[in-house]
Amino acid sequence: MANLYYREDLEAAAFVPGAEIEVDGDEAHHAVRVSRLRVGEQILLGNGSGALARGTVTVAEKQRFAVALSAVQLVEAATPRVVLAQALAKGDRDERAVEQATEFGIDAILPWEATRSVSRWADADKRERGRAKWQRIAREAAKQSVRPWIPEIESAVTLSDLAERCSAQGTAVVALHPAGTTTLSAWASDHAAALTEIILVIGPEGGFADAELDTLRAAGADVRVLGETVLRTSSAGPAGIAVLNTILGRW
C-alpha cells in the first residue's frame, strides 16, 4: 500500500493527471527524513477534502518533495454525515476514541465536557489547544487509514449546544447509553438512510448524569443501547460508527 501525504491548502482543481505538486514543511520533512521517501516511489497525495491522487516522486530533498500525478479520484462527502460528540475523558481515552473513530470513517468530531468528565478544558486557551491536539490525531489517523477526507474537530460544545442540534432539519441526535430501550442497529435500520446528519453522543467514563439524558430527551434526542455489554468511552463511539457503517452499506 502506497503512503498517503496531504496538501490541505490545495483545491481539488489542482489535482489533475500530469500535474506536478510540491510538498514542503513538516509533511515533507517526515516523508523524506523519517519515511525515507525516494525518487521513483509511488505515493498517494490528497488535500484532506476529497481529492486523492496517485503519482510518482520526481524530487526528494531534505525539506521538500514533488510528485507527478498519474491518476486522480475526487470523493464526495458521505451522506448522511456521521458526527461523534465525544465527552472529555481521563487519561488518553478520549484521544483513543478520536483516533479509532477516524479510522472507522467519522466525518466530524465534537468535543464536549460532560458533568462527570474528569478532564477539563477550563478556558479558551486550553479548549483551543485540546481541539488542535485532537485535530492532529485525526489527521495522522486519516493518513494511516488512507482517507480522502480528514474529519474536522469542531469547537468544543456544551450540553445546550447538543440539545439545539436536535432541532436541525434532517439531523438526529442519538445518545448511546445502557438505559436505551432499543438498539442503535434497530433505530438505524428504520431511520438512518433518510437523514442528512447523525450525531452520536458518548458520555465520559462515569457515564451520563441523569439530568443530561433528561435534557437530551426533552430536546428530541434518542437514547439507544449498543448491545448487552457496557463499553468504555474510548470504544463506544467507534462501535457505534461501525454499526452505522454496516446499516448504511459503507462496510
Image (cartoon, helix red, strand yellow):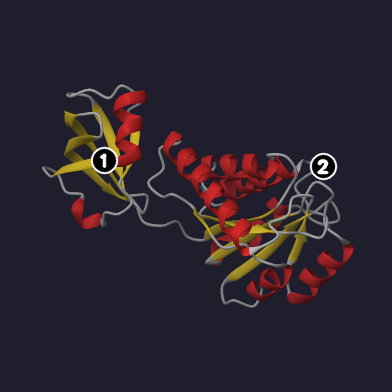
Residue 156 is left or right of residue 182, and the answer is: left
The disc, 1 or 2, on the residue closer to the chain's N-terminal end is 1
Residue closest to the eye, 206 or 102:
206
Residue 181: image quadrant is bottom right
Residue closest to the eye, 149 or 22:
22
Q: Work out whether residue 251 can be spotted.
A: no
Residue 135 is left or right of residue 200, and the answer is: left
Q: Work out whether residue 65 can be spotted.
A: yes
Q: Which element carries disc 1, helix, strand or loop?
A: strand
Residue identified by numbered label 1: 24
Vertical placement of residue 97 versus 186, above or below: above
Say which mark, if any, is on residue 230.
2
Q: Which element carries disc 2, helix, strand or loop?
A: loop
- Residue 74 spot, x, y in % from top left: 29, 51
Q: Residue at x 79, y 50 (%)?
A: 118
Q: Residue furthest left?
A: 18
Disc 2 residue type (three-letter):
Val
Q: Residue furthest right?
A: 210
